[in-house]
Image (cartoon, helix red, strand yellow):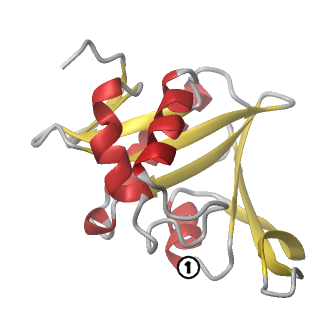
Amino acid sequence: MKHREILEETERLILRRYVEEDLEDLLEYLSDGEVVKYEPYRPMTPEEAKKDLAWRLGTDEMIAVERKDTHKMIGNVYLGKRKFEALELGYIFRRDCWGMGYAVESCEAMVRKAFADGVHRIYAECDPLNERSWKLLERLGFRREAHLKQDVYFWKDERGRPIWKDTYIYARLKEEK
């Protein structure tokens, strides 16, 4: 495997930049309809995953999450740069890794690192129907700041009408533990 730029390590995980060899692992979870159910995109084809990986290789906002024991890339954490020293947090993991604490472990490490690096605020948006996601945010010490009603849509119905969705907004400030 090519040199991997490691950002953080936890007890079980390596948090690093993407490498070209991640394509197969990336496709495994981004092509799973249950995994991307709340995302603004459909399950990806191999061609779409290849394009997505090219984007991930060129950004420092996407962090690959790799298991130390298997060296398999199992998901990612997203830390998107926003105005006023803020970051937007996102995450997505393989379905067979749900409920194993990998999301908490990786997000805790990256949130801690971001605050240590001087970030003032980290926020996340999630679908209220995605209970696993907002419970994870609460476990990470984020507080719910808003419940936006029918503020966004990703898809349209067969008649071309938007399928509106609500959004929860969670946030945590540097000084909040």
Residue 90 relative to residue 168: left or right: left
**Mark 1 residue type:** Glu
Residue 120 relative to residue 142: left or right: right
Where does residue 99 sit, x and y in percent of width and height? 31, 70
* Residue at the far top in the pictured view: 3
The reply to whether residue 24 is visible in this rendering is: yes
- Residue nearest the observer in this picture, 123 or 153: 153
Would you place residue 22 above or below residue 41 in this image?
above
In percent of the image, x 39 and y 36: which residue is there?
A: 64
Which quadrant of the structure image shows residue 109? top left
Would you place residue 10 above or below residue 133 in this image?
above
Where does residue 106 sit, x and y in percent of width and height? 39, 44
In percent of the image, x 75 and y 70: which residue is there?
A: 168
SS for dot 1: helix
Where does residue 60 sit, x and y in percent of width and height? 56, 23
Which quadrant of the structure image shows residue 115? top right
Would you place residue 116 above or below residue 23 in this image?
above
Would you place residue 18 above or below residue 97 in this image?
above
Residue 147 relative to residue 29: left or right: right
Which quadrant of the structure image shows residue 37? bottom right
Residue position marked by numbered label 1 in the rendering: 131
